[in-house]
Every structure is written in structure tokens, then in C-alpha cells.
């Protein structure tokens, strides 16, 4: 064999000659170079975090316009997310999904009411993944149309649009929170389900001092203790509204969110867009009382706000289904900075939010064929 004959040729060389050759070579070359190293960015202790896998076969291939991005392991300069609820399967829903795809956010918060028809949940999921990609974090919380199974089932939605955020705590689709990115997060997303009936006909208990009340308070307090810059709460039902509904989220629970200084509270249910001024409690506002107005609860009445003064509430029920009217004469209307509905600046679309270490900037982006816009910003002290 060729290898053996090579060994035999070398076996005849005098050991002294070999030793001298090796010594001369070492003197000419000097010490061996150190092994190459790949620099590790500051604050990075390992490979990037990956999203938790969903059920096998639950993801669809990303389309050509997919906004899918890799989940970062450490805090980027900015985190961009979108949010909207009340979606359906119409052309309007597809236009809003196209708008989201064009914005290319890291994730989307879907604020409930999805297929609007039992048995069509998979069709809804296929529509979403076809527009945004199977790996895109389309993060859901239930609405009233799928919570009790009459017009869909949240369990089916969770199965075909599973969680994509690592480190999620709670029951996905019902009540959960997740920090994003997982390491050195900029935002804690807290998704809850007050004011919604489930299969047994009962509404989940978010009353003062209840288990779910305490869970929410702890999630908000925990974000502050971890020094996470921003807290964003999402749920289907609003409290304040110039639209169709009253305070289904509950007065006490809404005041809890203000007391614990949630920065931004997002909801759907009312098929319109409504965005409040920054609302806070204090000597002039011992409590926010629905269906009335108190000027003492207006912490900051313009669009450039400072963190900690109060909470901004935004209803974004503009995900695709038919719009509801808004009422300029509603007693709660002075709490609001902007609104859009069927009878005023009608628009489907999404809220587009960007969080950095020092500010939270948001704007309403209309879908194709609509023009209404709104924008606001909260700065850290």
C-alpha cells in the first residue's frame, strides 16, 4: 500500500539527522501562534436564544413578504411590535396583515376575536402564516368570540398559532407574560383576559385581591424590579371607550394597571381606534371612574409624555372586521386624544410601536385605501 511504503522510506533515516532538522525548523518558526478566537460582544454569554417550538406541523412556510426575524439574545437598540384585534377572514383582514408584513416588526400582539366562526380556526391560522410566515411570533390572547367556543375555540387557535417567545410564563392564549428579548429585555408583554366568559359560562375573576389580580400586579411589579424599561399590557376588553362598550375590563382592574404604572394598555373588542391621553391617579384623581370625566386624572394631555406620570390606553379593534361608530359626546371623550370609527375617519390598520431604552414611540398605520393616522411618544425620565 502507498502509505506503508512511505513509512518504510522514512524508517531508514538516521535519528540524529531527524532531530537536527526538527530543531532548526523550530528555531526559524518561533513559538506556535495562539488559537484563533471569535470576539464575544459585551453582555453575551452564549448562542442566541431560540423560540420555543410549537406543536409538530403547526407552522407554515414563510411567504416572500414574510417579516420573520431572528429573536435576539441580548437587548437590541430597538424593539418593534404591532398590535390589533378583531380580525376575521375578510379582505380587510388580509389588507391589515399586508400592512404588518410591510412594517416587518419583531412580533405582533393579536388582541382577540380571530376567525369569528367555529371550525374555521385553521383557515385563520393559514391566512396569518401565509402573510407573515410560519415562524413569525404572532402572539395571541383570547377574545370573547373564541373564549366560549361558540364562534371558535382559543385552544384551536393556540394549537395552530403557538407561542414563539422563549421564557413565556403563564397560560398562553389566556393569561401570560414574556420579556423581550429574553436576555436584557426592553419590554415586558403582559396579556390577560378580564371581562370574558369561557366554556363554563363564567367570567375569569380579575376582581380586587383575586388570584388573577395578584398575578397581574406581580407581573407588573416584577418588570420594575428587573429594571425592564417598558411594560405593555394587552387584553381584549377595554374599560374607557367612546365606542359601543362600557367598562367590561372592570373599574378596579383598570385602576390597578394605572396604580402599577403600566406604560401602555392595549385592547380590542370595540371595532374602532381610540387612544387616550396619559391617565394617572393622585390627589386630584383618587380613582378613575368609568362613564364620567375628572380632569384630575389627566396626567399629561399632549402627545409627548413622560414615563411614570400615568398610563396610555389604546383600543385597536381595527384588524379587519366591520367598524363601529364613535361618539364625540361620550362623557369619557375628554380622556381621549384621538379616535377613528365607522362615522369618523374610518380606518382599518394596526398600531406600530417601537421601544428603545429611553422612549416608547407609537403610530397608527392605516391599511391600504385608508388615511387616518395617529402618533404619540413616552420618554423615560
Image (tube, rainbow, N blue to C red):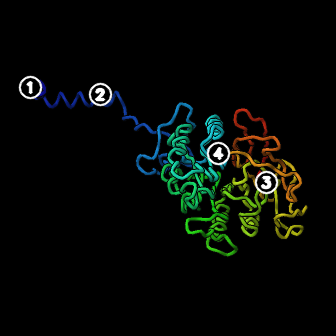
Please name which of the two marks, 4 or 1, marks the residue nearer to the observer: 4
Binning the other alpha carbons within 10 Å of mark 3 as few (below 14), some (14 to 19) or many (20 upward) gives many
The one nearer the camera, 226 or 303, is 303
Q: Position of residue 337 (x, y in %)?
A: 84, 50
Label 3: which residue? 243
Sequence-wise first label, 2 or 1: 1
Binning the other alpha carbons within 10 Å of mark 1 as few (below 14), some (14 to 19) or many (20 upward) gives few
Q: Position of residue 150 (x, y in %)?
A: 57, 58
Which element type, helix, strand or loop, lies under badge 4? strand
Label 1: which residue? 1
Sequence-wise first label, 1 or 3: 1
Task: Indicate left or right for 346 with 17 as reference.
Answer: right
**Marks 3/2: CA–CA distance:** 86 Å
Seen at 47% across and 46% down, the residue is 47
Residue 25: which disc? Answer: 2
Sequence-wise first label, 4 or 1: 1
**Marks 1/3: CA–CA distance:** 89 Å
Amino acid at each position: 500500500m502507498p502509505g506503508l511504503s512511505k513509512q518504510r522510506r522514512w524508517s531508514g533515516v538516521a535519528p540524529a539527522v531527524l532531530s537536527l532538522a526538527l530543531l532548526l525548523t523550530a528555531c526559524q518558526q518561533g513559538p506556535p501562534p495562539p488559537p484563533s478566537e471569535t470576539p464575544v460582544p459585551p453582555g453575551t454569554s452564549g448562542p442566541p436564544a431560540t423560540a420555543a417550538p410549537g406543536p409538530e406541523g403547526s407552522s407554515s412556510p414563510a411567504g416572500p413578504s414574510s417579516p420573520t426575524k431572528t429573536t435576539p439574545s441580548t437587548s437590541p437598540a430597538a424593539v418593534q411590535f404591532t398590535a390589533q384585534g378583531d380580525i376575521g377572514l375578510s379582505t380587510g383582514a388580509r389588507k391589515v396583515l399586508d400592512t404588518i408584513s410591510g412594517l416587518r416588526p419583531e412580533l405582533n400582539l393579536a388582541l382577540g376575536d380571530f376567525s369569528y366562526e367555529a371550525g374555521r380556526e385553521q383557515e385563520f391560522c393559514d391566512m396569518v402564516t401565509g402573510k407573515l410566515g410560519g415562524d413569525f411570533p404572532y402572539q395571541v390572547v383570547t377574545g370573547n368570540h373564541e373564549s366560549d367556543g361558540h364562534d371558535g375555540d382559543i385552544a384551536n387557535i393556540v394549537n395552530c398559532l403557538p407561542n414563539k417567545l422563549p421564557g413565556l410564563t403563564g397560560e398562553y392564549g389566556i393569561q401570560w407574560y414574556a420579556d423581550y428579548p429574553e436576555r436584557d429585555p426592553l419590554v415586558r408583554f403582559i396579556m390577560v383576559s378580564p371581562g370574558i366568559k369561557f366554556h363554563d359560562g363564567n367570567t375569569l375573576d380579575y376582581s380586587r385581591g383575586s388570584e388573577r389580580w395578584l398575578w397581574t400586579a406581580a407581573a407588573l411589579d416584577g418588570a420594575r424590579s428587573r429594571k425592564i424599561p417598558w411594560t405593555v399590557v394587552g387584553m381584549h376588553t377595554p374599560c374607557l371607550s367612546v365606542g359601543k362598550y362600557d367598562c367590561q375590563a372592570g373599574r378596579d382592574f383598570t385602576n390597578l394597571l394605572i396604580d402599577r404604572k403600566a406604560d401602555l394598555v392595549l385592547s380590542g373588542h370595540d371595532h374602532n381606534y381610540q387612544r387616550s391621553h396619559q391617565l394617572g391617579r393622585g390627589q386630584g384623581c383618587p380613582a378613575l371612574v368609568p362613564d364620567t370625566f375628572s380632569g384630575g386624572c389627566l396626567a399629561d394631555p399632549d402627545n409627548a409624555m413622560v414615563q411614570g406620570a400615568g398610563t396610555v390606553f389604546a383600543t385597536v379593534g381595527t384588524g379587519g372586521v366591520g367598524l363601529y361608530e364613535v361618539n364625540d359626546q361620550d362623557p369619557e371623550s375628554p380622556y381621549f386624544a384621538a379616535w377613528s370609527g365607522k362615522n369618523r375617519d374610518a380606518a382599518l390598520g394596526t398600531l406600530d410601536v417601537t421601544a428603545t431604552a429611553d422612549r416608547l414611540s407609537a403610530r397608527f398605520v392605516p391599511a391600504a385605501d385608508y388615511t387616518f393616522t395617529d402618533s404619540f411618544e413616552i420618554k423615560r425620565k
